[in-house]
Each structure stands twice: as C-alpha cells, then as structure tokens.
Amino acid sequence: MSYAFDSTALRLKPTSSELTPHKRQRPSEITTVPSTKDIWTWTLTSKATAPCHVRNIFEMTENPEDYDFYWLGRVPCRNVRLVGLVIGVSVYPKKIVYSIDDGTAVVDCIHSQTPSPLKNCKQNVASSGEAKKTCLPPMPTPKAEVGDFIQVVGRVQKRFKDRQVIVTQLSRSSPNDELEHCRLVRGLHIKSYSLTSPFTIPSPSSGSPQSVLKHPPLTKRAFSPSPAPQSSPPTSVASSPAKSSVTQLSPRKLRHPSRLHSKDFTANTFRIYMKHYMDNLPDLVSPTYQVESLSDCESDAQIGRSLAQTPPSPTKRSQYDSAVVRNTEDFATPRPTIKVVEHTPRPRIRPLTFASVDVSSSTSAVPHVTSSVPVTRFEGRPTTTSTATTITFPRGFTLSYLRRVPELSLLARKVTEAEARRRAREERKKAKEAAEAVGGAKSTRSTSSKSLPEDKLAAKMKRLFEWAIRALHKEGSIVLWDGPVHPCTSLSADDTSRLWKAINSTMSNMAANSTLFSSSSLAGFSQLEDDDGYLSDPQEGEEAYSPVTPGYLTEHVEKAMTGMRPTGRGHITIDGILRALKKDDRWRNLGSWSVGDTLELMCKHGRLRELGHGRWELVS
C-alpha cells in the first residue's frame, strides 16, 4: 500500500483511490431551496391548506414578491381551514357573509352564491287596482345560522387594511370539532409552523403535517351533513335540519346616528330608525352558548376533558370520546367519578339582557310556551333532549322607554337641532330677499344661529317622538299593545351594540365602537335630562306599542284563518284575512304586505300551503 505525504498535517494518509468501499466518505445531502414560483404553485394544491386559528390569519406575513401567498411561520399558504362559531350572517343577492369567532379573533367569510334565473312571476295584489309587479330573484338561503359551529376552507384575501376569507367549502360542525381543530393547530404550531429550518415542498408520497388536511376526521355528531348540489365553483357540503328551512339571520344594521351626515337629520330618518330599533331589539336577546374559549391553547388534557363532557349524543358516547378519556393523563389511574362544573358550556358572547325585573312579579309576564312556529324573540338555554321547548317573552314599547334609548335620543337631538338651523336659514333668506326688494340694500344685520334652550329642545324632541309613533301607527308598522312592557330601568349601553354597522368590516371592533357611542350618548344626553328633570317619570298605564312583524302576526293570522275556514268551495285570500283582522279596531291600519310576509313565513314552516292564484290553506 502506498501512502501520500501531507506536508501540512505532517502525517501519512491513504489516497482516496486506495480506500476500501466501506471506508469511503458519504456525500453530504444537498437540500435545494424551492423558488418562489414553485412555492406559489404548491400553495394552489389542496395539500397546502393550513389549519389555523382566526388570529393567525391576521398575523400571517404577506409574501413581499409578486406571487400572492402568505407565510404562516415558516409554512407558505393561500388557503386555510377554520372551525368556529357563527356570530353574524348577512345575506346579499350574490353572496352570504358569515362572521366566525373561534375565541382568538373574528373574521368575515365570504361565500359567493350564484343567483337563480329571474322568473316572471306576478305578485299577489289586493283588489284596489295596484299595478302588477314582477318578482325579483329570491335571496340565497344561508347554510348556517347564528349560534352554529361551522368548518370553513377558503382563501385568505386582503381587503383594504383588513383580511377576509373567500369560502370554497363550508360545512356544519360541532363543539367537539372545534376542540379537535384546536388540538390539531396546536400540534402543527409546535411541529411545523414554528420550526427554524427552511421550508421544503413535500413530495407527493411523503407524509407531511399538511397531508392530513385534505380529509380531516370529524367526530360523530347528532346530525350528518349531506352534500349540496355543486352548481358553482364554491361548494357547500352542509345542510340545515330537515324540519325547518328558516334560518336565524343577524339583524340588518343601520349606520350609527353619530355617523350620519347633516343632510340625513330629518324626521323621516328618525321614523326609520325608531322602526328599526323596535323591529330588531327582540332578536338581540338570543344568547349563544358554547364551550369555553380556547384562545390560550389549553393543554391536551383539558381539551380531552372538554371533549369527554360534550358527547355528540345525549344517550351514548362516541368511540373517539372514550379513547380521549382513556388516553388523558388525568384519567390514567382509576378514581371516583368527579362532576367537573368548570368546563360546562358557557356563552362565548355575554348574553344581552333587556329586562332586570322579576318575571314572577306580574301575572301578565308569565312566559308563553309555543311550538307551532319556531319564530321567537327570546330563547332559553338549549336543552339536552332532542326536542327543545321555545319560550317567548313579548314586551311592548312605551314613549317613556323609547325616549330613554341612547341612540334614539341622540338622533332626536340632532334632528331637532338640524330642523332649527334650517328654519333659521330660511328666515334669514326671506328677510334678505324682503330687504333687497324694498330698499335695494344688501343686508341690515346677520343673525347668528343660536342653539335652542334645553327646555325648548326637550319639548321639541318629545314632539318628534310622538310624531314618529303616530306615523308608524298610521302606516300599520306598529299596533297597540296591552301586555307587559319594557321597563325604563332596564336600559344598558351594550343592549343595542349589534344594531349598528361597525366602522371596520370585521366584527371584532363592533362591540367596542358601538359601546363607545352608546356610552357617550348615555352619559351625555340621558344624564343631562334625568338630572335636570327634562324627562318626566314613566306613568302607570301608559300606552304601549308592538312592531308588526311576521313572527308577531303569525298567531293572529292563524286564528283568523281558522275562523274563516270555508265549509263549501270558499277560498282564503289575503283580502279575506285582512277583512277578518280589521274587525278588531287594533288592526285597522294593517297593510296587505304585512299579511303576505306572514303567510310566506308560515308556508316556510309548514303551517300553510299555497293553492295558487292567491289562495291559501292551513295544514291540519
């Protein structure tokens, strides 16, 4: 064997050609860093869908180059998977916006809809000779309602200074799925997202953390979502329960009175806002219950305990839950069964309350139990049985109560002051024209617009409230109410936070903004009038009013139709129902459109069927 002399190391070493095969040095593995284009191409695949929290969507780093994708830690992604609670549903002709809260943040998920073709159907009109109108395309039906858990897969999109998710898949979910999703995301953050090594595109055959994203396992639940027909690229694989096709939407929102323009401060605007408040206030008191927030990423033992305590069925536990209990460290050794109260489902959003009175103090305030039409104003805590009973607490609105609503009081003040400025401007204009016509002089003196004294301002504001109530009653939007009323002491600054549009598109800042407006108006105007005596004390036996909504009219229309049930070949029409209702002076101003909306609602709930040509029949 020959040796080569290394003068630097001053030692002999064998040449590489004389090394035996088992002694040859292995070539070092060279990791090729993928290009930005290759990464962007990979993010378009289904394997690149990243499960994450809503908070991660806003924390992602946008790729600085030309390609459109984001960096979730070290992992690139365009599409994300979310599981959370629906806290808002807004329906538009071509899209449905779901606001999802998973305990970390709130994001708007845009689900595009393909409008159905326009059908030339003729609207049913009364015999007064109104012109026939063609119907517009029906609004799309949401796949989930407020209070449901949903799973969303979609693309992250930048919108102004905010971000939203463009939905490609949407399915109904359960609290167990949210806990599973939280555990999965927590593991991915530890094993993949937060690593310091550079990202490499996984091969198609290799198992990567993203390989489980294509078809994630879901726990068993009481209902099984069925796929919907895929008529458009955005798919939806959820279906609502078969017994009810009517979803509970979040109330329509108007701009907060403090954000209106000067030209909008008119009496008609005030009438619209009062009607909006009376229509949507009862819908805001439905508390949404769910499991505790997982914003801090609890340990696996806590998540497993929560999964064990929320079985998908009231009678039996799923196999997954049993496995979780066996694998949880806290249940490793036999021990007595302990009833854990701390992890029972609680409302994520604080329930809105509008009355702090004792229901048992008045016989007229006894809750009314109904099960015929599931359109309610107040809903109790969901029961654990398969059939839940709905309890309603209808209450009327008095003038004293409406005058103490912070937003209505603020708007009434602004409208009154704006009307005073307009009248002063008109008086100055007339005086100037009269002076020019008489002597040709320009203007004798300029009268500065002074604000009204507080006593006169309060009186004019009260007259504005009275005018709005009379106008709403005359047009049939409200009727007299002889039941329990909203007490004036039950007002809160948070009661109307969901009635007004937020400044930002996301709903995370909506409660803070609306509470700020409500608190300022409540501290300013209400304190001023209550302390100085500009608001009189509520009177006993004060007239109360109730908004005429389809849910409120359902019972009365059903009674009228029962009394009108034909014995021969007679037919029940909208005009006939109106004549039957107007026998009571309470409904003398009721319009045919209100009865028509009520009949459509009853038809959706299966209480009524349309025979055609404007004829209706009760379902026995």
Image: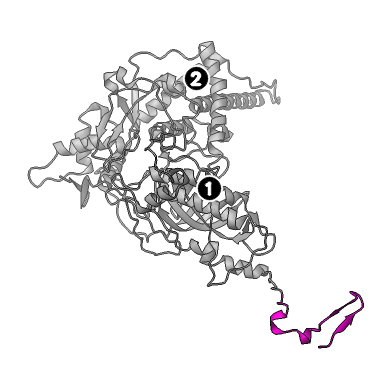
Nearer the observer, 374 or 559: 374
| Image disc number at residue 521 | none
Which residue in the rendered view is the most extreme toward the left? 568
**Residue at mark 1 to residue at mark 2: CA–CA distance:** 43 Å
Q: Secondary structure at mark 1?
A: strand
Q: Nearer the viewer, mark 1 or mark 2?
A: 1
**Residue at the disc numbered 2:** 460
Would you call the spot at circle 2 few (<14 residues within 10 Å), some (14-19), or many (20 or more)? Answer: some
Q: Give the x, y percent position of residue 215.
A: 44, 62
Q: Amino acid at mark 2?
A: Lys
Q: Secondary structure at mark 2?
A: helix
Left or right for 518, reference 233: right
Residue at image point 22% right, 33% down: 581
Left or right for 78, reference 144: right
Which residue in the rendered view is the most extreme toward the right? 7
Examine the rendering and report whether any part of residue 214 can be seen: yes
Above or below, 516 against 134 in this view is above
Q: Quadrant of residue 558?
A: top left
**Residue at the disc numbered 1:** 107
Segment tinted magenta in the rendering: 1-27
Nearer the observer, 8 or 615: 8
Examine the rendering and report whether any part of residue 143 can be seen: no
Q: Amino acid at mark 1?
A: Val
Q: Give the x, y percent position of residue 476.
A: 33, 33
Residue at image point 70% right, 20% down: 445
Residue at image point 92% right, 78% down: 7
Above or below, 384 against 181 in this view is above
Would you call the spot at circle 1 few (<14 residues within 10 Å), some (14-19), or many (20 or more)? Answer: many
Residue at image point 51% right, 31% down: 266
